[in-house]
Every structure is written in C-alpha cells, then in structure tokens.
Amino acid sequence: MDIGEDRVIALVDMDCFYVQVEQRINPELKNKPCVVAQYKTWKGGGIIAVSYEARAHGVSRNMWADDARKLCPDLQVARVREAHGKADLTPYREASVEVIEVMSRFAVIERASIDEAYMDLTGSVQDRLKHMSVQDITPQQLKSTYTQGFPQTSTSDPSEDARRLRGLQQWLERLSSSGQSSRAELCLTVGALIVEEMRAAVEEHTGFRCSAGISHNKVLAKLACGLNKPNHQTVLPLGSVPELFSTLPIRKIRNLGGKLGTSVKETLGVENIGDLTQFSKVQLEQHFGEKTG
DNA sequence: GATTTATGACGT
DNA sequence: AACGTCATA
C-alpha cells in the first residue's frame, strides 16, 4: 500500500545568510550581534537579516536599525551597498552561487531562493544502501542531527546536546532492531548522512553554515529544517508527524502563513494543522477550491 | 511616505 | 501565454 512517500527530500537553508556574507567580508563582525540593513536615511535603515546573537536581544527582520540598537546597544550594522539609488544584492547572489556549486556535487539541486535549496536524495540513498547497512551508521557521523520525536521518554538531560544524542541513539537502536516500517526511516537516516557531508563541504569551501531538514516531501523537509536552527539538521520521520502536528499552528506550514492559512483557521474553526485530519478531502475542496483543497 | 525588493509558484 | 495575486526571505 502507498503510505504516501518513499522519497527522501532535503531542504537546506543558510543561517542568516546575508549576515554570514558580510561577516566573511569583514571578520570583525563574526560572533557578534549583527544585522544587515538597507538604506540609511530613514531610522537607520530597514533590517533584512539578523545574526542569532542579535535575535537573542529581540532584534528581528523588518525592524528599523535605530529601533534595534535600543534593544541591543552594541549591535553591529552592516549595510547593503547601493548601486544607483538601489540596493545592490550582487554579493549575496554570488555567494549563493558558490553554495549551490558545492551542493550540486552531492545531488541535483532545486534552488528555492537565494539562500535555500531542495534536493531529492532518493537515488543517492539507494546507491549508498547497496554498500552499507544500519550497523555502519554511527552517532559520530550524525554530529549535528536531531531526530524529531526522539527521545520518546522525557527525562532531564544535562544539556541540549546530550538530549539530542540520546534521541539519536534511541533512533539508531530502534532502526537496527528493525521494526516493520523501518525501511523508510533507514532511508531518511542515510539521507541525513549525505546532508551532514554536504553541509560540511559547504562550510569548508565557502565558510557558510546552514541548517537542513530531511523528510519525505518538500513541505515536511522545510518544516523540519526550522525545528533546530542554526547549524543543525533535523530528520522528520512520518511517525513523528501526528504529535508534531497536534500542536503546530496552521501558519507554520509553508504556503499557509498568509491569507489562505487565516481563512482555513477561521472557516473551519481550528488552530493546529493536525486538526485538519477530521475533514474529508471533499469538505476541504468545497471550502478552498478543487486544487487548493 | 516609511515593513524593501526580488523571486517563484499558482491561478485566471 | 501573459498577467495578477500570494507567499517568503
């Protein structure tokens, strides 16, 4: 039976990309609260990218640089160069090409934006599985990988990374003591292996860090990517989707962040994406059109 | 006058 | 096929 997807899809997203580009140009900015802003005249310029150090102070995109400085007095502000009265994004486009070139060595890439790319790893995973088995996979090869939904028990861990590792170990043990639906999960894990290597290569050759999500389709991969940022990757197995969806606001799903998401919420009177399972396809088509529904 | 600007996907 | 709308960063 077709349980939906047996593909392995990854989404790689550069962490605060414009900031990283500016930090590579000017190393003084590294490891500091830092933003990239465009146009200086009005309130110091509009912020279009924010380092994670700056986010910790509450600085966000679309803020004016002057307002951000109130939240974070030692904020570093890099400015987008202007060409002829217009913001010149050339440096970021060129950096994007560098990244895409490295990623393309590993798989066929679908560039989704200047700092994001999807890739179908199904074929690469199958190839690699011909030469290896579950026992060949070690936690050391998955240094920056989270497995969503694991660990399943909630005990207290000394650190965030200790918990990540426990979840990963639990996941790998479960895989090797092979359950029934573990084929798809094994494929995701090998996908995660490839993405670890890809991200390491991207950092080695460009200096840029990124996060990634690995799942069975683009929507889930995108969602997974956002679960553990920055500089980490997240495997989202099908089995962990129901629990995740049960508390996930509709707007968090790609393409439901705008008016459609709001209308879904209001029309059906639900909050979380998991609530949609109680409606039939026919019902959804009635409300939102044949294609959208 | 002040949340830019660009880009891609989708629908008509 | 071209154009407008929506979504995202």
Image (cartoon, coloured by chain):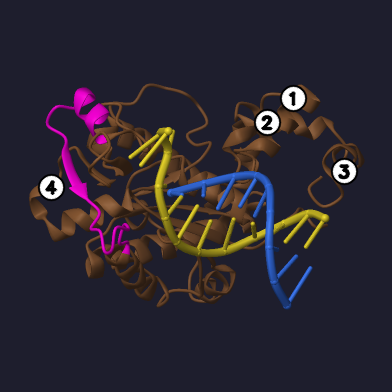
Chain colours: A brown, B yellow, C blue
Q: Is residue A165 left or right of residue A56?
A: right
User: Residue drawn at (66%, 36%), measured in percent from left and top?
Assistant: A259
Q: Is residue A264 left or right of residue A21?
A: right
Q: Are marks 1 and 2 in contact (CB under 8 Å)?
A: yes
Upstream in sequence: badge 3 or badge 4: 4
Going by the numbered disc 3, the residue's amino acid type is Glu
User: Residue drawn at (29%, 31%), measured in percent from left and top?
Assistant: A59
Q: Which residue is mark 3?
A: A285
**Residue A116 tag number:** none
Residue A160 part of the magenta-drawn span: no
The chain under label 4 reads A
Give the residues drawn in magenta, as a range: A65-89
- Callout 3: helix, strand or loop? helix
The chain under label 1 reads A
Q: Is residue A217 left or right of residue A267?
A: left
Going by the numbered disc 4, the residue's amino acid type is Leu
Distance (Cα) linking label 1 and label 4: 44 Å
Q: Which residue is mark 2?
A: A262
Q: Which residue is mark 1?
A: A266
Residue A87 part of the magenta-drawn span: yes
Relative vertical location of residue C6 with respect to residue A9 in this rendering, above or below: above
Question: Where is the C terminus of chain A found, in terms of image quarters?
Answer: top right
The chain under label 3 reads A
Q: Is residue A261 left or right of residue A89?
A: right
Residue A191: x percent and y percent?
50, 62
User: Residue drawn at (43%, 74%), measured in percent from left and top?
Assistant: A106
Q: Which residue is mark 4?
A: A29
Using the rendered image of the protein, determine whether residue A21 is visible from the camera's viewpoint.
Answer: yes
Upstream in sequence: badge 1 or badge 4: 4
Question: Where is the N terminus of chain A found, in terms of image quarters?
Answer: bottom right
Discs 4 and 2 share one subunit:
yes
The chain under label 2 reads A
